[in-house]
Amino acid sequence: MSYPGGGGGEWPPQNNPYGQPQPGFGQQGGYPQQPQPGYGQQQPGGYPQTGPQPQQGFPQTGPQGFPQQGYGQQPGYGQEQGYGQQPGFGGPQQPFGQQPYGFAGGEPPKKKRTGLIVTAIVAVIALAAGTFFTVQALRSSDVAAGSETPTTAANNLLSALGSGDVLGIMNGLAPAEAKLSKDYTEATVDEAKRLEILKKDADPQKISGVEIKSEGIKFDDAAAEKVNDRLTINKVVEGKITVTSDVKKIPLTDKLVKALGAKLDQEPETETLDFAKEKDKRKGKPIGIATIKVGDDWYPSLFYTIANAYLEDEDLKWPAQGIKPAGADSAEAAAKQIVEKSLAGDLEGVIALLPPDEMGVIQDLGPVLLDQAGRVGDSGAKLVELETDSKDVTGGKQLTIKKLVLEVKGKKAEISRDGDCYTAKAPDGKSQKICADEIAQLVEQQGGRDVPPAAVDVISRVGAQVLKDGLGVVATEVDGKWYVSPIRTYSEVVLTLMRGLEPKDIDELLKLVK
Amino acid sequence: MRRTWGAVVGVVGLITGVAGAFLPWLRSGTVVRNSYEVLAFRGFAGLDGTAGEVVRGVWVAITPLAVSCVVLWVLRLHRFAACVALVFGTIAGTVAALAAVQGGNEGALVGITPTGPLVTLGGALLGVAGAITVLTAKSRTVIVSPGGAP
């Protein structure tokens, strides 16, 4: 359809469905709902309407239709200012008398303006609410950092403990400790599932069987011991922590439940730690929860808490100065250095080669440990050569021996690896080679017929796995330097041994338990 | 009329969906956390680095997405709004459905709380239903002049 513009000119009278002259001003069809109040009364003219004009000729009184300006924004509809500018409409300025826009005696169109305002308000409220909730979402989803003060950090840990909030505990712990725990809990649970110890759907994040509650925990802020700028021991003087363990809730496989039988029928065990009573037992010394500063935030630390308990038990103090970490330039160099320093009895050097994030506690305790260990003598052996194979493992690189040559009292001893075979050459020149598939035979030879076939099978399989994967140290990178991680090294050894087992080995073990 | 009803259903769905995201999604011990607080633990699910940030960005974006959709509807840009509502419904609904089916874990220290996922899922479904209604509704009838050209 087309709308005649405001070009004026008379319209054929037959276009008026009402059959009477329209006193309007070039109203177009298609806008019957938009009244032109008073046109009919006040402006007698000769401009017939072209479309249905149901309301024409009747004075409009209410605020109906859109504001007149609206017409003016619709070019081609022949309205608005065009009324007066259209030739033949009686004059360019005020062709319609006193009311150029035609609202003779009517009120302004409040209703539609109200709608517009309501729309704007709703839009603004929606945007404001959206902004608020988006900011909330962003804040909540940010990886939870530590706390601003040591006391808050310790309190958060105990609150998380008290409400059994495993995620809160893991997330609240010092980052390096939490990562260690996460990395090896997952790997160990996966192996336990493969060995059919835990159910297939057991989730390391959904540990069950332990319930922890805390009540009335109070810290003595004044007694907090500030060891240095990044270590504070917070003293808990009141409150209780109750731990209830229920073996029945551990997601053990059915065969394990059946095998353990009566042992699983026991009632849940509950243990309570009463901080006030502990303080009395410890001659007025409250239990300390250690917090460390990482970056700008404070975190509770399990390792430092254990170390602090050890110092208190031994009636020792935190040293004023720890051992400065001294990493190597590469993982291989770190492995080589730790072997050299160990052989040389350089305990301080060994401690300096530990990762400062995971093992910072050992470095802070260093002088005390050195003092306790006393003088460690040189082994008399020297590292001549160390070649390693490197493999990426969770959190670092595992370095296994490819070739190790030591010099002991002027004579060389060597261990080398070729595939899953190891060859050892003694200083006297004798050599022995053992391969993964020879382990069973070796066990039978060494153990004789007394060793049950099932045990031979297990030992040979685990031994073969060890030779195949190789045993070594795990090096981690911290701030561009490489260190040797004892916890990761130990965990990888355990995992290697577990990987050598098969579900049927667990069945054999269960038979032994019975 | 059908379009208006579609818009109303869509807006209700979007608001419900966003509200659900702020309701409990995960229980750890006696502590419950909403979907955004759960995202703070994305590292535990192996979503470190860029992948984690992408997941976080997408999920946080559902709120502004819902708001922009509501504003478009208020401005009577129905079809645009319906398209945005479909995107919202797809993202929120998929995540909520995945979380809802993981629910349960009774007795475990950590488990999914179905309240939040189910509310968000309901909202997402309503949002999609509203969007489809709007998109399939016929355009408004225009009264044509019976007269024709002068």
Image (spheres, coloured by chain):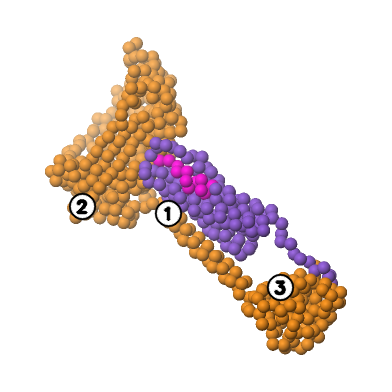
**Which region shows up in magenta?**
B110-121
Residue at 30% x, 29% y: name it. Answer: A267
Residue at 58% x, 71% y: name it. Answer: A114
Distance from disc 2 to disc 1, alpha carbons, whole Å, reads: 30 Å
| Residue A140 marker | 1
| Residue A220 marker | 2
Neighbor class of circle 2 (other Cα within 10 Å; few <14, some 14-19, many 20+) is: few
Task: Give the residue furthest to the left.
Answer: A283
Question: At which x and y percent is residue B132?
Answer: 65, 52
Question: At which x and y percent is residue A159?
Answer: 31, 47
Residue contact between numbered discs 2 and 3, judged by CB atoms under 8 Å? no
Query: Is A314 on the left or on the right of A27, as rendered?
Result: left
Which amino acid lies under the numbered mark 3 shown in the image of this protein? Gln
Comes first in the chain, label 2 or label 1: 1
In the image, A320 versus A325, the foreground residue is A320
Secondary structure under tag 1 reads: helix
Which amino acid lies under the numbered mark 1 shown in the image of this protein? Ser
